[in-house]
Image (tube, rainbow, N blue to C red):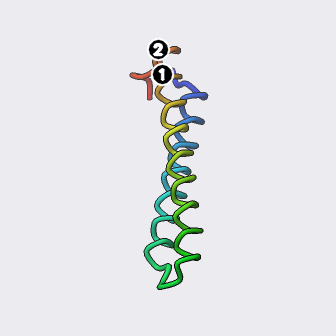
Amino acid sequence: MTCDEKERLFNEYNACVSDWAHAVERLKDAGSSQSRYLELLSFVDDARAKTQRAKAEHMNHMAEHGCAGQI
């Protein structure tokens, strides 16, 4: 039996990871503008925090629901 909520949370986590990676790539290409760098750094920090929250929600759901071993 599959857990729809686990799958939804995992997909949300994956999307957050992708957003975070994209933010890091943009930061890498920021150039020499300090203001642009700081703006993008803030974006990276926000994406990282969102990813951490999504991961925690996914992990907490599996622990509470007992669906960690389900596909």
Amino acid type indicated by mark 2: Gly
Assign a secondary structure to mark 2. Answer: loop
For the C terminus, the quadrant is: top left
Q: Which residue is mark 1?
A: 62
- Quote the CA–CA distance across marks 2 and 1: 5 Å
Q: Are marks 2 and 1 in contact (CB under 8 Å)?
A: yes
* Rendering coords of residue 16 (x, y %): 54, 50
Along the viewing direction, whichever of 68 and 34 lies nearer the viewer: 34
Q: Which quadrant holds residue 36?
A: bottom right
Q: Residue at x 49, y 40 (%)?
A: 52
Badge 2 density bin: few <14, some 14–19, many ≥20, Cα 10 Å = few
When the figure is inspected, residue 23 is found, relative to residue 9, above or below; the finding is: below
When the figure is inspected, residue 30 is found, relative to residue 69, above or below; the finding is: below
Q: Residue at x 52, y 73 (%)?
A: 37
Assign a secondary structure to mark 1. Answer: helix
Left or right of 3 in this view: 68:
left
* Rendering coords of residue 49 (x, y %): 53, 45
Amino acid type indicated by mark 1: Met
Left or right of 66 in this view: 46:
right
Badge 1 density bin: few <14, some 14–19, many ≥20, Cα 10 Å = some
* Rendering coords of residue 3 (x, y %): 55, 24
Q: Residue at x 54, y 69 (%)?
A: 38
Q: Which residue is mark 2?
A: 66
* Rendering coords of residue 46 (x, y %): 57, 52
